[in-house]
Image (cartoon, rainbow, N blue to C red):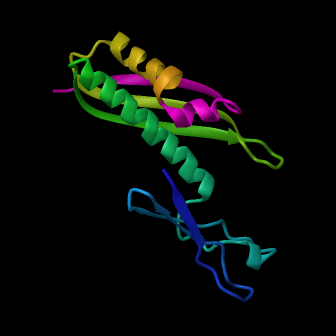
Amino acid sequence: MDCTVTWTGGSGARSGMGFIAETSSGHVLVMDGAPDSSKPENGGQNLAPRPMETVLAGTGGCTAYDVVLILKRGRHDIRGCSVKLTSERADADPKVFTKINMHFTVQGKGIPPQAVERAIAMSHEKYCSASIMLGKTAAITTSFELVEAA
């Protein structure tokens, strides 16, 4: 796996802090920084997610993928899955994640709560590389809600 990240800015005070990431799977991801009114040359234009937001989003995608796959492999009738991640970061550089809560909403028909709990635990203990890696600096907590499909 590889990725090339290229700065989209140019010369001048308003060059911005936008970046384009090109992944080995052939996809493109745009990132940008937050505007900085005190130093415009250091700020972004707020045109795309921040790099750390993409780390959080990627982690959510990684763990949701696992949960869906584990439930499908267990032959459960899963019909939907979302995960809301809320986080806190350190105040000083490097501003690593220090706390992350992941709240899963799983929709399906007749799925036992224990199956969802097990799928989430397996993701965080064994399969989700992103959350396991972030768990080195952040206290990660999880919760879930199971919604019965009609």
Magenta stretch encompasses residue 145: yes
Question: In screen coordinates, is 112 left or right of 87?
Answer: left
- Residue 56 to residue 150: above or below: below
Q: Residue furthest left?
A: 150
Q: Residue at x 57, y 65 (%)?
A: 5
Is 115 rendered above or below residue 50? above
Query: Can residue 118 be seen?
Result: yes
Q: Which residue ends up furthest to the bottom in the rendered image?
A: 12
Residue closest to the far front: 1
- Does 34 appear in magenta? no
Q: Is residue 106 visible?
A: no
Which residue does the image show at 62% across and 52% down from the upper left? Answer: 52
Count every numbered label the image shows and give the total.
Answer: 0
Q: Quadrant of residue 39?
A: bottom right
Residue 128 as seen in the image, left or right of residue 55: left
The foreground one among 40 and 12 is 12
Q: Which residues are magenta?
A: 128-150
Residue 62, quarter of picture: top left
- Residue 36 locus on image (x, y percent): 74, 71
Looking at the picture, how far across and down is residue 105, in whole percent?
38, 30
* Residue at the spot 44% in from the left edge and 57% down from the top edge: 24
- Corner quadrant of residue 101: top right
User: Which quarter of the rendered picture does the C terminus lie within?
Assistant: top left
Q: Residue at x 77, y 42 (%)?
A: 90
* Image location of residue 67, percent across then percent down: 37, 27
Question: Where's residue 143, x and y in %?
Answer: 49, 23
Q: Nearer the viewer, residue 7 or 50?
A: 7
